[in-house]
Image (cartoon, helix red, strand yellow):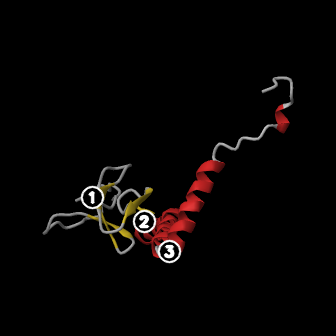
Amino acid sequence: MNQDTPKIFQFNLSGLGFVLTLLTIFMVLGAVGLGWLVNGFLILMGLVLISPAIAWLVFRWWLKRNLVEGNCPVCAYEFTGFNRTECRCPSCGEPLRVEQGRFNRLTPPGTIDVEAVEVSAKQIED
């Protein structure tokens, strides 16, 4: 090959032989009566090409349905969790359960939540 010719005129046909061989095999199989084999191969290749797009759509639907964004009931820190799971608040460390799109405290049975109220100290005189 002449090294002085510009590279713009060079063609790379190395993959063309494989494509022509594959096309010839498909045509021969179709002529012999094994067209179902060619159709099955083409359907399989179509499924391989389209399955990532379908998987991405299913994953987005699942995330939209199961990802919950809300506030911690103890410290009001906003964070994200998965529905029907247990987690801890990243801010205060309170164990929480995610149910029906909300964060709920995990408390043992019999626990009574009390809210403290500040009372001003007043001297009572007798």
The foreground one among 125 and 64 is 64
For disc 2, the marked residue is 67
Q: Residue 75's spot in the image, x, y percent? A: 39, 56
Q: Are marks 3 and 1 in contact (CB under 8 Å)?
A: no
Q: Residue 28's spot in the image, x, y percent? A: 54, 67
9 lies left or right of 88 = right
The foreground one among 61 and 17 is 17
Q: Are marks 3 and 2 in contact (CB under 8 Å)?
A: no
Q: Earlier in the sequence, mark 3 or mark 1?
A: 3
Residue 124's label in the rendered image is 1
Q: Nearer the viewer, mark 3 or mark 2?
A: 3
The foreground one among 27 and 56 is 27
Q: Quadrant of the C terminus?
A: bottom left
Q: Residue at x 50, y 71 (%)?
A: 43
Residue 35's label in the rendered image is 3
Image quarter of residue 21: bottom right
Callout 3: SS: helix
Callout 1: SS: loop
Q: Nearer the viewer, mark 1 or mark 2?
A: 2
The foreground one among 17 and 122 is 17
Alpha-carbon distance for marks 1 and 2?
Answer: 55 Å
Image quarter of residue 99: bottom left
Label 1 crowd (10 A; few <14 / some 14-19 / many >=20): few
Q: Residue 40's spot in the image, x, y percent? A: 46, 71
Q: Earlier in the sequence, mark 1 or mark 2?
A: 2
Q: Residue 104's spot in the image, x, y percent? A: 31, 67
Identity, as a three-letter code, of the amino acid under mark 1: Ile
Label 2 crowd (10 A; few <14 / some 14-19 / many >=20): some
Q: Nearer the viewer, mark 3 or mark 1?
A: 3
Alpha-carbon distance for marks 3 and 2?
Answer: 47 Å
Residue 60 visible within the image:
no
